[in-house]
Image (cartoon, rainbow, N blue to C red):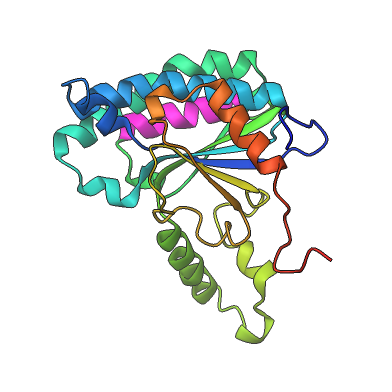
């Protein structure tokens, strides 16, 4: 079993469901927002680790379409945290040559959050070491349904429709499918994340709650991935 990362067998794209902020806060007798705030450090460490290792694309599931149904106070706090985090972390992205991008129905975000995102995306657009993708107001079902609506709107002939063409209508059309999906907090669910893209993605689940997730945890996930045999529905032979 491999114990160290093989730089010649890295996943191009890693996706992460950052789960466990609420439970982390609750275990400390705090409100859920306290967990979200402390999750920012895990984001910073993970992004830096990914860039250092040589990962080209990192997608973080930051806010799902279902998250809008949470208590208004929590949603407002999350949006405020999003604005401050983007504002505070843009310098780190620039220092590490990381490009920021988003997927999801970001038009539904508060104007202040949208403005901050646009500003950071514009500032980092020429960075090329790694692309950090924030999934905001995103869900896999929303994305697939949105792609179907666009196909209908453009009157694409069904006879011409295949996987390659359909992918061009997804929000990830210029990004390779993730080879590895990490989910923290011990939950074994996809939770409506990149449903089309993860058809053959390796899944890695860790009991670690997101605010406690660090560079070593990220590296463990990659080593676990490198110890697997990827067959894409074929046999090992």
Q: Where is residue 17 in the image (x, y as percent from the top left)?
A: 45, 41
Task: Looking at the picture, tell me which residue is in the foreground, 58 or 216.
Answer: 216
Which residue is at 25% across, 21% downward?
A: 34
* 66 lies above or below 55: below
Count how many numbered circles sit on residues in the image: 0
Task: Looking at the picture, tell me which residue is in the foreground, 4 or 232.
Answer: 4
Which quarter of the figure is the N terminus placed in?
top right
Q: Main secondary structure of the magenta part?
A: helix
Which quarter of the figure is the C terminus placed in?
bottom right
* 55 lies above or below 140: above
Quadrant of the rendered image containing residue 109: top left
Is 26 left, or right, of 79 in this rendering?
Answer: left
Q: Is-magenta flag for residue 228?
A: no
User: Which residue is farthest bottom?
Assistant: 159
Q: Position of residue 171 (x, y in %)?
A: 54, 53
Which residue is at 41% across, 60% downward?
A: 142
Task: Looking at the picture, tell me which residue is in the foreground, 106 or 180.
Answer: 180
Q: Where is residue 70 in the image (x, y as percent from the top left)?
A: 20, 44
User: Which residue is farthest front?
Assistant: 1
Which residue is at 23% across, 36% downward?
A: 75
Q: What stretch is highlighted in magenta?
A: 111-124
Q: Position of residue 100 (x, y in %)?
A: 56, 31
Is 15 left, or right, of 98 in this rendering?
Answer: left
């Amino acid at each position: 079993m491999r114990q160290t990362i093989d730089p010649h067998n890295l996943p191009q794209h890693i996706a992460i469901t950052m789960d466990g902020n609420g439970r982390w806060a609750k275990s400390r007798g705090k409100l859920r927002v306290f967990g979200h705030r402390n999750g920012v450090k895990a984001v910073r460490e993970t992004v830096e680790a990914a860039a250092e290792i040589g990962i080209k694309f990192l997608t973080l599931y930051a806010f799902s379409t279902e998250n809008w149904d949470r208590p208004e106070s929590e949603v407002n706090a999350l949006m405020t945290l999003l604005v401050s985090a983007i504002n505070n972390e843009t310098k780190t992205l620039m220092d590490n040559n990381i490009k920021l991008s988003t997927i999801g129905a970001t038009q539904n975000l508060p104007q202040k959050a949208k403005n901050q995102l646009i500003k950071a995306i514009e500032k980092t657009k020429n960075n090329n070491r790694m692309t950090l993708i924030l999934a905001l107001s995103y869900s896999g079902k929303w994305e697939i349904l949105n792609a179907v609506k666009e196909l209908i709107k453009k009157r694409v002939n069904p006879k011409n429709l295949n996987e390659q063409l359909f992918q061009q209508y997804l929000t990830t059309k210029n990004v390779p499918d993730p080879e590895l999906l990490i989910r923290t907090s011990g939950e074994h669910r996809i939770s409506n994340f990149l449903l089309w893209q993860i058809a053959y993605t390796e899944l890695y689940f860790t009991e670690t709650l997101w605010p406690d997730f660090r560079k070593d945890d990220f590296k463990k996930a990659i080593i676990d991935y490198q110890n697997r045999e990827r067959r894409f529905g074929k046999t090992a032979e």
